[in-house]
């Protein structure tokens, strides 16, 4: 297993759990707004083989308003 695979998977699971928590009644929005970006920023490089060779995450279509 690669050096950062476990960290990557754990962080993705935490982000998913946070997304589920956000859907609960009474979820603390301040907590979500604080923790979500921190978790996303802490994602290490994806493990090798997660994306196909030559994959470019910026290679998709423009979002509305971009050009």
Image (tube, rainbow, N blue to C red):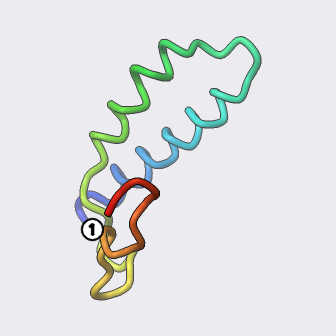
Q: Is residue 1 at least partly visible in the picture?
A: no
Q: Quadrant for residue 27, please give it.
A: top right
Instruction: Choose between 28 and 11: the one closer to the eye.
Output: 28
Number of numbered markers: 1
Q: The N terminus is located in which quarter?
A: bottom left
Q: Give above or below for 38 relative to 47.
A: above
Q: The C terminus is located in which quarter?
A: bottom left
Q: Quadrant for residue 3, please give it.
A: bottom left
Q: Position of residue 32 (x, y in %)?
A: 50, 22
Instruction: Choose between 53 and 57: the one closer to the eye.
Output: 57
Instruction: Choose between 29 and 9: the one closer to the eye.
Output: 29
- In the rendered structure, the answer to whether residue 47 lies left or right of residue 23 reads left
Identify the residue shown where x is 46% and y is 49%.
12
Q: Is residue 60 at least partly visible in the picture?
A: yes
Identify the residue shown where x is 41% and y is 25%.
35
Identify the residue shown where x is 37% and y is 36%.
39
Q: Please name the residue that numbered disc 1 is placed on.
A: 2
Q: Position of residue 17 (x, y in %)?
A: 59, 37
Q: Give above or below for 49 relative to 33.
A: below
- In the rendered structure, the answer to whether residue 19 lies left or right of residue 26 reads left
**Would you call the spot at circle 1 few (<14 residues within 10 Å), some (14-19), or many (20 or more)?**
few
- SS type, badge 1: loop
Identify the residue shown where x is 49% and y is 39%.
14
């Amino acid at each position: 297993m690669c050096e950062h695979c476990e960290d990557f998977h754990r962080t993705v699971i935490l982000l998913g759990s946070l997304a589920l928590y956000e859907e609960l009644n009474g979820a603390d929005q301040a907590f979500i707004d604080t923790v979500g970006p921190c978790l996303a920023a802490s994602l290490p490089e994806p493990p090798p083989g997660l994306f196909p060779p030559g994959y470019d995450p910026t290679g998709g279509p423009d979002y509305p308003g971009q050009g």
